[in-house]
Image (cartoon, rainbow, N blue to C red):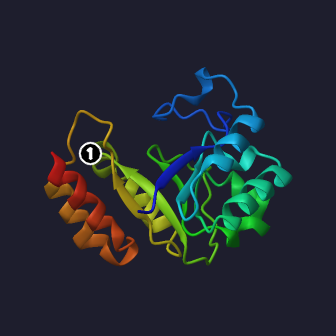
């Protein structure tokens, strides 16, 4: 049986998002030796997701070592990033199975989503009733026509997503939304 492991590489992050579910800024830093020890204990053939904090903060040589150890064990490696990884470590992007570009709930104008032209990069946007209603999801979708955003329902909120708003949005913008989005919503709604 393949093990699915999320591996935090660091508690450091270059963003201070108030919606972060990890609350990383109030935790002590993870020593690299501790991360390396955990990687060495991972079973061969596992699917490992690098997370954090922001994995892009690590040094290139640290990332290369972690990747080599896992690849030697025939592990599949995925990545969660807010985009810093692309800026600092673009040559390593081909080492990952899936890359989930940071999910953004509040959509400030200064966030840029470059066209990376990699099929394994998923640009995630967290959807709430608020950003459906205030139009910020519509604005983001229209601002970046080169991207099919993977829309993710906000599972942290006590307020459930208005299904009528969601279906109206999918009907209006279905060609600009990643096809997996509807599955994400159906999976979450079925748990409600």
Which quarter of the rendering shows the C terminus? top left
Front position in the image: 188 or 174:
188
**Among the 4 quarters of the image, the one containing residue 99:** bottom right
Residue 83, position as x, y percentages in the image: 65, 55
- Res 17 visible: yes
The residue shown at (18%, 52%) is 189
- Number of other residues with Cα within 10 Å of mark 1, as a class: few under 14, some 14 to 19, many 20 or more: some
- Res 88 visible: no
In this view, the residue farthest toward the right is 61
Q: Secondary structure at mark 1?
A: helix
The residue shown at (73%, 44%) is 36
The residue shown at (40%, 50%) is 126
Residue 146, position as x, y percentages in the image: 53, 76
**Among the 4 quarters of the image, the one containing residue 117:** bottom right
Front position in the image: 99 or 145:
99
**Among the 4 quarters of the image, the one containing residue 181:** bottom left
**Horizontal side, residue 188 vs residue 104: left or right:** left
Residue 84, position as x, y percentages in the image: 70, 52
Which quarter of the rendering shows the N terminus? bottom left
Instruction: Give the number of marks.
Output: 1
Residue 159, position as x, y percentages in the image: 22, 37
Q: Which residue is mark 1?
A: 129
**Horizontal side, residue 69 vs residue 152: left or right:** right
**Horizontal side, residue 40 vs residue 138: left or right:** right
Up the image or down, 2 lies above or below 51; here it is below
């Amino acid at each position: 049986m393949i093990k699915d492991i999320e591996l935090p590489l660091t508690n450091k992050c270059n963003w201070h998002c108030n919606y972060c579910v990890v609350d990383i800024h109030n935790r002590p830093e993870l020593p690299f030796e501790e991360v390396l020890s955990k990687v060495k204990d991972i079973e061969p053939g596992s699917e490992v997701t690098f997370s954090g904090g922001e994995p892009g903060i690590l040094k290139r040589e640290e990332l290369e070592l972690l990747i080599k150890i896992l690849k030697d064990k025939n592990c599949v490696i995925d990545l969660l990033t807010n985009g810093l990884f692309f800026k600092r470590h673009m040559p390593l992007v081909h080492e990952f199975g899936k890359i989930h570009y940071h999910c953004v709930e509040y959509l400030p104008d200064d966030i840029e989503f470059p066209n990376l032209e990699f099929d394994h990069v998923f640009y995630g946007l967290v959807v709430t009733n608020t950003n459906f209603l205030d139009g910020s999801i519509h604005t983001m979708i229209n601002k970046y026509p080169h991207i099919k955003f993977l829309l993710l329902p906000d599972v942290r909120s006590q307020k459930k997503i208005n299904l009528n708003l969601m279906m109206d949005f999918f009907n209006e913008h279905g060609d600009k939304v990643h096809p997996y989005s509807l599955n994400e919503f159906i999976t979450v709604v079925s748990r409600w």
